[in-house]
Image (tube, rainbow, N blue to C red):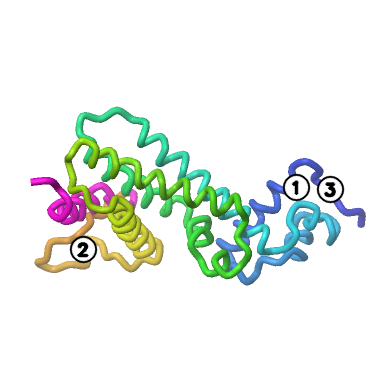
Amino acid sequence: MKKKYHHGDLRRKLIETALQIISEQGLEKVTMRELGKRLEVSRTAPYRHFSDKSALLCAIAEEGYKKLSTIIGQINEQNTDDPLIRIQNVGVAYVKFALSNPVHYRLMFGNEILESKRTPELVRLAEEVFNGVLFPIKLCQDKKLIRPINPYIIANVLWTMSHGISTLLIDGQMQATTAFKGLPALIQVNEISGSADIDRVFEYLGEIIANGILER
């Protein structure tokens, strides 16, 4: 049987197929041979776009960082009368991105990437995302709304909180309101859509952080 070649779209097809395999069967099932088999191309065709599986995973992570950077950038460009809200909005957008792109998100911060040779582009995009988190913090400091402590420390606290909530929600470890009896729930769950109210999470946790960094 003659193999089919996707020419210009093969790189995109490789990424899409890898994402599908990871979502359905797990990362360990992704191999260059399996990708070629599914796409009905020769064994060597995938290597024309990615030198190995590690390079493919880096490309997927890069794609994730690009999406997240664009989302955070759009929030930072929005006009608001309250710069503090911008910090909350960045956190909310971060978590919503993670929930909408769980495969990308796990690869962006997983050991599969950390233990492999990260591409310069991947490092640059990761820094771009962090700078997007840092921007509203520095803005609030410039307006003397929060304390002039090291903004990188505050940014790491915000990232840690966002990452923790994202991971808990993706793994199904953060409980819905119905799981609590007589205790205030941290999040509400829409019974129709099943989506968590991430805005409420950050409104609540944001107040806790603000009590420590707001100027008095």
Q: Which mark is residue 10?
A: 1
Q: Tell me the SS state at disc 3.
A: loop
Residue 178: numbered disc: 2
The disc labelled 2 sits on which kind of residue?
Answer: Thr
User: Whole-Å distance between the Cαs marked 1 and 2?
Assistant: 46 Å
Asked if the residue under mark 3 is in contact with the one under mark 1, i.e. CB atoms within 8 Å, the reply is: yes
Image position, residue 204 (x, y; %) = 18, 53
User: Which residue type does callout 3 highlight?
Assistant: Tyr
Mark with earlier residue (1, 3): 3
Would you name the residue on which mark 3 appears? 5
Badge 2 local density, few (<14 within 10 Å), some, or many (20+)? Answer: few
Q: Position of residue 120 (x, y in %)?
A: 61, 53
Q: State the extent of the magenta-drawn residues as a range.
A: 193-216
Residue drawn where x is 66% and y is 63% of the image: 54
Q: Magenta stretch mostly in which secondary structure?
A: helix
Give the spatial CA distance, label 3 vs label 2: 52 Å
Give residue 141's quadrant in the image: top left
Q: Relative to 165, say whether 140 is above or below.
A: above
What amino acid is found at the position of numbered circle 1 in the picture?
Answer: Leu
* Left or right position of 210 against 190: left
Q: Is residue 68 left or right of residue 53?
A: left
